[in-house]
Image (cartoon, rainbow, N blue to C red):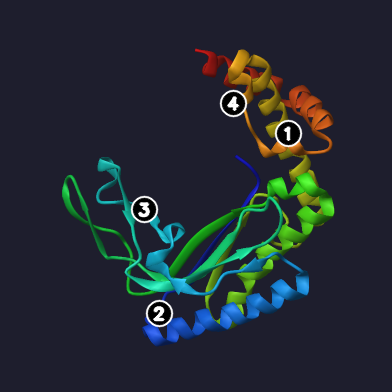
Amino acid sequence: MGLTIHYTLRLRHTVSSAHAFALVQTAHRRATQLTRHRKLRGLTAIVPAAEESWAVEHRRVGPKRQDQWAELAPVAGWVFIVHVGRDCEPAMFGLCRYPATAHTRYGTARTGCGSGWLLKSFSKTQYASVHGWEHFLKCHRAVIDLALLWEKLGVEVTLSDEGDYWPGRNVRALRRELDEMNGVVAGLAGALKDAADGAARSSVQSPIFAHPQFERLEAEGVTQHAGKIGKVVAALRR
């Protein structure tokens, strides 16, 4: 749970493995430059996608009435990971190819993956706010801009920003969404901890507890979302 940026990188047309690898190399160089310029934490070397567990694609396959989900390991591709900043989830980038079919209990099913190149990933940025608004904003912007680097390489980029910063780079909307989500999480985390008994209290953990304004956020979250928080606590007690 937390404010997250989701993104998809896609090459719909067929290109060779050599061409795809060259695109990843170029993107890695540009990400390295951005990392240095923005003073981000750093990034990894390029590795084969098969070596990175985050590159597994979860997709529903077969007839919808069967509701079959498959974990699709990449059959080709390369990825790298950018460590954006403290308490911001790392962001993975790259290009992968996935199998056209998968085995299910009903037999072999088509996955819908064509011959193009694809990567779907996300980065939860919310808890970077534990270190202040400016740090959070720096991290959130960096994830967006790291994804957009790929557009200049001819890769289709789809972004879904739960913070409403993108599109439009609306900082005011982002601040509003961050405060709202921090209040929800703080209120729920505090309520769960209060409801826990004995040793169970120490098992309730969340990065939001480290926020310097946790008590204010908790109070605001409880005030605004008391009904929903109460239902969650009651359900867990049952």
Which sits earlier in the primary sequence, circle 4 or circle 2? Answer: 2
Residue located at (61% from left, 81% from top): 29
The amino acid type found where label 1 is placed reads Phe
Which sits earlier in the primary sequence, circle 3 or circle 4? Answer: 3
Residue assigned mark 4:
203
Disc 3 to disc 4, how far (Cα)?
33 Å
Disc 4 to disc 2, how far (Cα)?
49 Å
x, y percentage for residue 89? 62, 53
Disc 1 to disc 3, how far (Cα)?
34 Å
Which SS class for mark 1?
helix
Residue located at (67% from left, 28% from top): 189
Residue assigned mark 2:
13
Which sits earlier in the primary sequence, circle 1 or circle 3? Answer: 3
Which sits earlier in the primary sequence, circle 4 or circle 1? Answer: 4
The numbered dot on residue 209 is: 1
The amino acid type found where label 2 is placed reads His
Task: Say whether residue 88 is left or right of residue 67.
Answer: right
Disc 2 to disc 3, how far (Cα)?
21 Å
Mark 1 near mark 3, Cβ–Cβ under 8 Å? no
Residue assigned mark 3:
59
Q: In the picture, which quadrant includes the N terminus?
A: top right
